Image: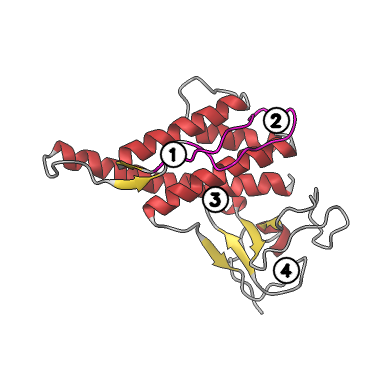
Amino acid sequence: MTPHHLHALAAAWSLHTARQVLAVHVDRERRHNANGLLDAAPILRSPTYGTRHAPGDHGDPTGTLLLDTRPTRDTTWSDLHRRLTGKLRWLAQQIDAPGAGLGLDPLALLMTALPRLQPGTAAAIGRHLVDEERWVRDAIRQPRPTQPLVGIPCPHCGERQLVVQTAGPIDAWTVVCATGRHCTGPDCRCGMPGAVEGVTHIWPRSVVLGPVAGSAPTTGAG
């Protein structure tokens, strides 16, 4: 997979774990209201439905969306959950993900379809997923789960500032460099197959830690 695919899948897994927390808030909200413990559901400040991106090149199946500049509104956890589900369902439909429209979990459909998408389409979907992840994590007040990869030099710059993105199963974990440097393309010393110029460096965890990465701890020896 290209870096575009890896970034999109990392956002998808992070969104998956954040959505689980959001669902807990929704369930608690509903139970409290059903038991008459609250006069009204807790109110949050949330952006209205929209996107900050106008993604895609010519032929991109996600199309182009206008920037939503409407003011924020008061909403509840249930409102946020419905908004997220609607956006994910729309994204799954845009790429004709198998099973879209059948009432299946749209995020699961997107995660299954992502590895087979063209790099440009994966990048466009990834930008949407990052946007969704950002506002959900802002709402639940939890950052993307990460761990420092102690003592391991970056394959690109050699600095020991690698971070493992730990959302999802261990096989889905990815590694990024905290320096935030960008790839220079196929000749980049990052060594990433499918390297794309201008994309922030990202590697599968197994590429950085080697073939035993699946059983090795996240932190490495100096």
Question: Is residue 52 highlighted in magenta?
Answer: yes
- Are circles 3 and 1 on residues that touch, CB within 8 Å? no
| Highlighted magenta segment, given as a residue range | 50-71
Mark 4 lies on residue: 154
- Are circles 4 and 3 on residues that touch, CB within 8 Å? no
Circle 3 or circle 2, nearest the eye: 2
> Which residue is the extreme one toward the bottom?
222
- Are circles 4 and 2 on residues that touch, CB within 8 Å? no
Residue type of the residue flagged with mark 2 = Asp
Circle 1 or circle 4, nearest the eye: 1
Residue type of the residue flagged with mark 4 = Cys
Query: Residue 135: where, in percent of width, then height?
Result: 45, 48
Image quadrant containing the N terminus? top right
Mark 3 lies on residue: 169
Mark 2 lies on residue: 60
Mark 1 lies on residue: 70
Q: Secondary structure at mark 4?
A: loop
Residue type of the residue flagged with mark 1 = Arg
Quadrant of the rendered structure where residue 128 is? Answer: top right
Q: Secondary structure at mark 1?
A: loop
Give left or right: position of 222 versus 108: right
